[in-house]
Image: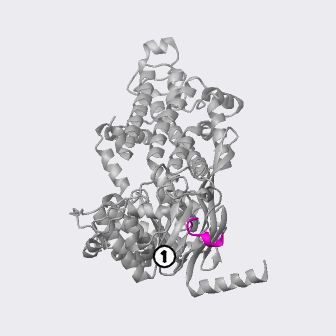
Amino acid sequence: MQSNSQETLSTHPEMEPREEQKKSKSPFQLALRRFMKNKLAVISVFVLLTITTTCALAPLFTDLDPERTNLLLIEQGPSDEHILGTNGQGQDNFARLLYGGRISLIVGFSAMFFTLAIGVILGSISGYYGGKIDGVIMRAADIMLMLPFLVLALTIIAIIEELTIPLFITIIALTSWPNLTRIIRGTYLSLREQEFVLGARAIGASDIRIIFRHFIPNAIGPIIVNATLMMATYIIIEAGLSFIGFGIPQPTPSWGNMISEAMNVRILREHPEAWVPPGLAIFITVLSINFIGDGLRDAFDPKSKER
Amino acid sequence: MSQQQVYKQITENREETDNNVLVQVDHMKKYFPIKGGILKRTVGHVKAVDDVSLTIHKGETLGVVGESGSGKSTLGRVILRLLEPTEGKILFEDNDISHLGNRKLRDYRKNMQIVFQDPYASLNSKMSVGELVEEPLLVNTSMSKSERKEKAVDLIEKVGLRASDRTKYPHEFSGGQRQRISIARALALNPKFIICDEPVSALDVSIQAQVLNLMADLQDEFDLTYLFIAHDLSVVKHISDRVAVMYLGRIAEIAPKKSLYDNPLHPYTQALLSSVPSTDVKNRREKIKLSGDLPSPANPPSGCVFRTRCPRAHDRCSVERPELTNMGDGHYVACHLYDNTDT
């Protein structure tokens, strides 16, 4: 009986009503659409973009040099020429806020990118090949995680005689790669057991191809989300280290440096315009990056929303 | 090797080339080590495939049935060399591929492909249908972009999808349609041999029939040879020329379809066939119920692995492992009930 029914059935695909879409959306486009529906995240993108462009176009907003000292104009209150007054060196606070934002954002972004590169490379090798190389990389990560970050960073910075911004970024990236590496490795381990990876191997795809075309696109969600959240952490780290004097060397401005300059009871009490703006800038930037990260997480993994 | 044995081997080889053997599996074993303890020492082996020999002829469909854990999927994957055999040989068109490195294997990959069971896990959801079907061409041939596109459209239509589906993504398709995409992908390199690893067991019954018919049509059109793995005897009956029954990593019985279904010899095959629901009231078989569970492949019973559940087991079964014996007309069975002649 079964064979009879099989012969009468056509070999054509199931003729279920399929709605004809004008254009089919790739999984990435679908994620983007989900992201756009998250108001908080979209607002955060605009806020972050505004902060970034303002800092990037700093010369349009102020003619003053953020590094030029003027000992005749120390700790001035707000005036027409110095909107946010001047600091203890007579440097203009407003110019320092804008130019300092550049530094803080560049440090956060580059350190994130650097960590991402290390994380993707080491995580891919570790998660894809497994075995001994995986053991070596993971034990190295364990050792890095064992050392307290702050102590390690402070020690390295203290040893280095002349700290430059690229060096600072490198130090941050080299001391905080294990988290992202572990996340990527973990994602790979779950992907490795899936049949489509076996299928790719069956058609003779090379390891490089399998990693780039099959693993990374499927792991991109956790990678992007964690990288974003990491950028927020790095901005905080930069501010924190600059605050205690181990960060971006003076006279280069950064948001952390500005707060550090105001570390004085008199300034704190009498000149809130000197330290509130950089503090607020750090707060808003980090908050919007975190909102964006959450939005991306929900967009890439729709299930995570149903909490 | 004595003179006589050499002579026998030569004649056997000649016979095989005459019979158009495409794939030959020779005493193949695949053991997975069980690691235990702090030092990850090997404490035992899961004998997924334990000394299996079979031949697959050009143009035929060999069905492989067995319950889960019988090693049928592992057998398929080792033949395709997605796994390396622990012991034994795999010959593809008389070339030994059992221990080839990845680079040399690539040449053979063009000739052997696989269609997986789970249509939801076997396609990369981030690639469009076009990319999925073109990927084997991109990896293995030097075709230009437009040639690849042309070929992909051709294949997509061959498996019964629309050319416009090329730009869609797997999540827009149902299970049966996804399986068609997998088939198109497997066909892209014009392989001679396709391993179908339970390709329809995840599908609805009505769609199973469509996919099976499609596969049968494609077999005629492209001159394909199938190794068709299933846990369902009725599916195998529909598509196979010969059927092998596996139990705990070994072949219990292998025979032409008609011979196996009409005259099953091994007690396990008999039990399996009797459990298939039948609508034929007059000729209904008496149901043989097997007691117990499948033993662990890490610690299989001595002698005949089936003896713990066999209704007709006797003393000899626990001592000696039965070999596949020819019962005539290509019907082989590994059971002590039938090899009394040489004792």
Query: In terms of depth relative to the viewer, which is nearer, A162 or B303?
Result: B303
Can residue A126 be seen here? The reply is yes
Is residue A303 located in the magenta-colored stretch of the structure? Answer: no
Query: In terms of depth relative to the viewer, which is nearer, A240 or A150?
Result: A150
Q: Residue sitting at 60 percent across and 50 percent down?
A: B298
Q: Is residue A246 left or right of residue B62?
A: right
Q: Mark 1 — on which chain does it sit?
A: B
Which residue lies most toward the right here?
A: B2
Q: Residue sitting at 62 percent across and 75 percent down?
A: B91
The residue type indicated by label 1 comes to Leu
Colouring method of the image: one colour
Image quadrant in which you'd find residue A292 = top left
In the rendered image, which quarter contains the N terminus of chain B? bottom right
Callout 1 secondary element: loop
Q: Which residues are magenta?
A: B334-343
Q: Main secondary structure of the magenta part?
A: loop
- Residue labelled with disc 1: B189
Which percent across, then down, holds residue A104?
50, 35
